[in-house]
Amino acid sequence: MAALQDKMQALFAILIGLFAPIQGIMFTVGFLIVADTVIGLWKARKLGEKITSRGLSKIISKMFLYQGTLITFFLIDKFILGDILMHFFSIEFLLSKVVGLILSSVEIFSIDENYRAVKKYGLWDAAKRLLARSKVVKEELKDFDLNDFTK
């Protein structure tokens, strides 16, 4: 049993080393899936929609599907197309990064759609409002002096 456990740990270490170049992409996509789920739950609660365990279980299949897609395209990128793509573009793992960008975009659009359903405006509008407010705060803080409070 100990020998099997040692072999499993060695295999796990090899797999971690193999997929190390895309760990950031995998984390980003996974984070966006979780964020989309949280925003979706917020939307359902605000709009009075029913939340079911069947609906929540979709996060598991989505996570496996997206991460599996990233791993598959990484292997294609690393062992089949990587050298060819490097002749045209000087970006390592270009295919993996493009697939990660596409999957991330899908999740960001879904987050925006859910946010828009509740707030009636999208994330871009929210960012512009936040920026406008920060300019107002900056103007108000221009005349702020800490010495006024020490007297």
Image (cartoon, helix red, strand yellow):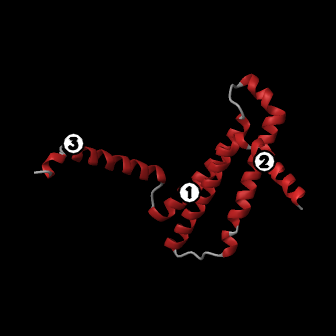
Amino acid at pointer 2: Ala
Q: Which residue is mark 1?
A: 111
What crowding class fits label 2: few (fewer than 14 Cα within 10 Å), some (14-19), or many (20 or more)?
few
Amino acid at pointer 1: Ile
Q: Residue furthest front?
A: 2
**Which one is in front in this view, the residue at disc 1 or the one at disc 3?**
3
Q: Are marks 1 and 2 in contact (CB under 8 Å)?
A: no
Which of the marked residues, 2 or 3, is nearer the chain's N terminus? 2
Location of residue 71 in the rendering, given as x and y in whole percent from the top left corner: 77, 47
Name the side, left or right, on which 15 lies relative to 1: left
Q: Which residue is mark 3?
A: 142
Displayed quadrant of residue 91: top right
Q: Which mark is residue 13?
A: 2
- The residue positioned 42% from the left and 49% from the top of the image is 127
Which of the marked residues, 1 or 2, is nearer the chain's N terminus? 2
- The residue positioned 65% from the left and 76% from the top of the image is 52
Secondary structure under tag 3 reads helix
Secondary structure under tag 1 reads helix
Position of the N terminus, as image quadrant, is bottom right
CA gap, disc 2 and disc 3: 54 Å
Name the side, left or right, on which 134 lies relative to 63: left
Number of numbered labels in the structure image? 3
